[in-house]
Amino acid sequence: MRHPEATRASCMGSVCSHDSFAHRRSWLRGTRIQELTKELSRARGELAEAREQQAATESANTRLFEEVQTRNTELRAALEHQTATSDILRVIGSSPTDLQPVFDTIVQKAKRLLNGHSAAVTTLAGEEIHLGALPANADQVHSWV
């Protein structure tokens, strides 16, 4: 046997729920659905435009970053070259009559600047070639001689 109040509560809940749904359904009919559809379309368009702007900004940022990296590499190379030149000139100024320190500095700087395996300075006296300087590494000296 069923309890009468439980049956009534169950039935009232069902009617109430049905009435609420019917009200929402009638409220969403006609112009309101069209308004919401237009609003959704406008929001989607704005989102697509924002994504395009973001992609363009990311592309520009990537290009600028690469340009800055390239420029930094060029500036580092120019600074190394100027530093090497300055070091060689300093050695020339400190020993104007002795060429050996100058040749040694030239070998060291040339090897470093050119990322070389080894380097050497030779001089030409008449028809003879003289070895002016070799790298300080003993293994490299033996391979040259």
Image: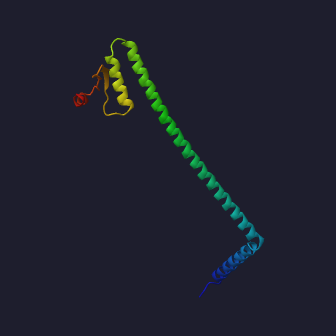
Near-viewer residue (140 or 12): 140
Give percent across and percent down for residue 141: 24, 27
**Residue at left 62%, top 55%?**
52
Q: Classify 69 as above or below 20.
A: above
- At horizontal 47% and vertical 36% (from top left) the residue drawn is 73
Say if 101 sits above or below 141 in the image. Answer: above
The x, y position of residue 54, in whole percent, is 61, 51
Residue at left 41%, top 17%?
90
> Can you name the residue that lies furthest to the front here?
127
Q: In this view, does 82 lie to the left or right of 54?
A: left
Tell me residue 75's x, y (percent).
Answer: 49, 32
**Which quadrant holds the N terminus?**
bottom right
Residue 93 left/right relative to 27: left
* Number of dots carrying numbers: 0
- Compared to residue 35, the image places residue 115 above or below, namely above
Along the viewing direction, whichever of 11 and 118 lies nearer the viewer? 118
Splitting the image into 4 quarters, where does residue 39 fall? bottom right
Comparing 62 with 133, the one in front is: 133
Specify the quadrant that holds the C terminus: top left
Q: Where is residue 6 in the image (x, y as percent from the top left)?
A: 63, 81
Tell which residue pokes out farthest to the top in this image: 97
Q: In this view, does 23 lie above or below 120?
A: below
Q: Residue furthest bottom?
A: 1
Which colour style is shown? rainbow
Front-lying residue, 61 or 100: 100
In the current view of this chain or complex, which residue is farthest to the right? 31
The answer to whether residue 26 is left or right of residue 13 is right
